[in-house]
Image (tube, rainbow, N blue to C red):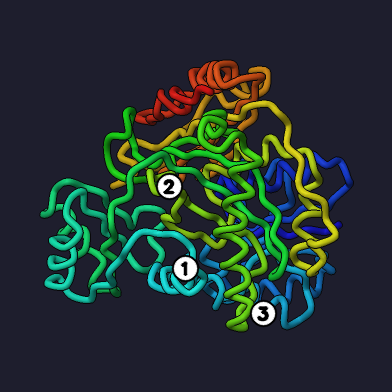
Amino acid sequence: MKILVLGSGAREHAIILALGAEEAGHDILAAPGNAGIAADATIVAVDPVDPADVTTFANENAVDLVVVGPEAPLVAGVADALRERGIPVFGPGKAAAQLESSKAFAKRVMEAAGVPTGRAVRAHTIDEVAAALDDFGAPFVVKADGLAAGKGVVVSEDRAAALAHAETYLPTGAVLVEEYLSGPEVSLFFVSDGDTVRALSPAQDFKRAFDGDAGPNTGGMGAYSPLPWLAERFGGEAEFVAEVARDVAEPVIRHLDSEGTPFIGLLYAGLILTDDGVKVIEFNARFGDPETQVVLARLRSPLSRLLLAAASGTLESEPAPEFAPDVAVTVVLASEGYPEAPRTGRVIAGTEAAASVPGVHLAHAATQAGPDGLVATGGRVLNVVATGADVAEARERAYEAMSRISLAGGHFRTDIAAGATA
């Protein structure tokens, strides 16, 4: 199968690695890719956010499946253009992708579908923000309504900080002020063909920049899967997944279909387990990063079959995905100054030594081949991904591998999955 993967991050590298692990002889193409992806796929000159460019390339090169990794091509309507030409694509159309691109749209859909979530107010002025903050009280939650690369949310006890965050995004659109919800967070992915959903395995990510959940929100500094502690509350992972599918994923997919905007792709449900039950914090319209790196590291079923079935409308005949019992942990190496002002252009050393640790592989994000070796080109540089028989073994392998990598000023959290006990 000839598969084109759009994107340049560790999420896309993880997808490509999972496709390659099938040993099915796939011809895997990537645009624009990165230095790590270039070792596992053929880089092609395609603009991933240009619907015409992607569609023309896919047609002229007989691509069997296009997989859209990041949100930008979805918002640009790339999936719509491909479907109009009859090219199978894994990723929702622009209208359905509003589940991610507009927090207000997502809240409206959740309300209409009867999905449990927190209260929210859409504010257009700083006075409206202030009034909503006073209504909900601390801790204060303010979210950019549109896309913000994982950095559009602030949760703070400081009212002034919440107002300042709102002021940053109000010039470009509305913001949402939300009710603060307390409890452990879980990420759960659902593959959908517009009618049927198939759940993947739950994961938990770590959004704050520093140990102990300190510092600003980031795009994610690490993750692990599965979550052994779900058994305490739900009896096991299967019971938890069944509940979320019934109460969240299926109602949303049915409602979007009833509105004439079928969701074909990956529905990411960001969940919080409150004292009042499971509630949705947010939806994304694509694989999450860094959760994808640990979920796909455990996937035993062929990823290509699952994605093609969703893109072709035949997911109902596809069995539920199977996962290894192993634990996967990923730790993100970030550039100095990330997330506010990352320092780029610095050489990365020790990646081969890191990848030689048993059970470890690397998923590249912001890397580029330079004259002096591998160079960091962005904030989140790469992921160390480790699997093990249990959390302790996976963490030990991940941090042993990370200790072999050097990047001047680079930083990573040392507490990823530290509290993950049954």
The image quarter containing residue 160 is bottom left
Whole-number angstrom distance, CA of label 1 to CA of label 2: 15 Å
Residue 98 pos. (x, y %): 49, 72
Q: Which amino acid type is marked by label 1?
A: Met
**Which of these two is toward me, 36 or 147?**
147
Q: Name the residue tied to disc 3.
A: 81
In primary-sequence order, the first of circles 2 and 3 is: 3
Q: Name the residue tied to disc 2.
A: 272
SS type, badge 1: helix
Q: Residue at horizontal 44%, vertical 58%?
A: 282
Residue 415 pos. (x, y %): 41, 24
Q: Residue 54 bears which disc, if any?
A: none
In primary-sequence order, the first of circles 3 and 1 is: 3
User: Horizontally, is 353 left or right of 151 in the view?
Assistant: right
Say few, some or many: other residues with alpha carbon within 10 Å of mark 1 (under 14 / 14 to 19 / 20 or more).
Answer: many
**Label tally:** 3
Q: Which amino acid type is marked by label 2?
A: Ile
SS type, badge 2: strand
Callout in the foreground (2, 3)? 2
Q: Residue 110 bears which disc, if any?
A: 1
Q: Specify the quadrant that holds the N terminus.
A: bottom right
In primary-sequence order, the first of circles 1 and 2 is: 1
Q: Which amino acid type is marked by label 3?
A: Ala
